[in-house]
Image (cartoon, grey):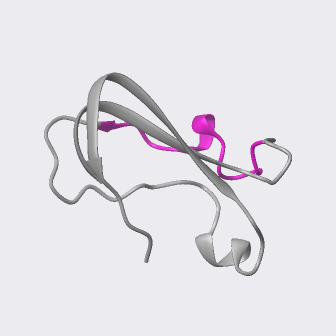
Amino acid sequence: LNSTGQIRVQISDSSGNPIPGFAYSDCQTIQGDNLNAPVVSVGKLSSLANRPVFLEFELTNADLYAFYLS
């Protein structure tokens, strides 16, 4: 993430339900002024291959400038 402030990320299924291992509570909070902050969750991103998902961002006094998946 390229961001400032405090951000958490959640990954939800096509029904809008948080996927276990990827809920806000499973994500480490990203804080400060970042150019390339990794998003760290309990779940493995590879387990979501070939399924539709939604990324949700919780921002507290924050700005999100960019994100990418790898």
* Quarter-of-image position of residue 61: top left
Residue 26 belongs to magenta span: yes
**Residue depicted at x 26% and y 55%:** 37
In this picture, is 29 found above or below 39?
Answer: above
- Horizontal side of residue 40 vs 52, given as left or right: left
Q: Name the magenta segment's main secondary structure.
A: loop
Q: Position of residue 41 (x, y in %)?
A: 54, 54
Q: Where does the N terminus fall, quadrant-wise?
A: bottom left
Q: Where does the C terminus fall, quadrant-wise?
A: bottom left
Q: Which residues are magenta?
A: 18-30
In this picture, is 1 found above or below 5?
Answer: below
Q: Position of residue 20 (x, y in %)?
A: 77, 50
**Residue depicted at x 52% and y 44%:** 27
- Residue extending furthest right? 15
Q: Position of residue 26 (x, y in %)?
A: 60, 43
* Quarter-of-image position of residue 23: top right
**Residue depicted at x 61% and y 35%:** 25
**Residue depicted at x 78% and y 72%:** 51
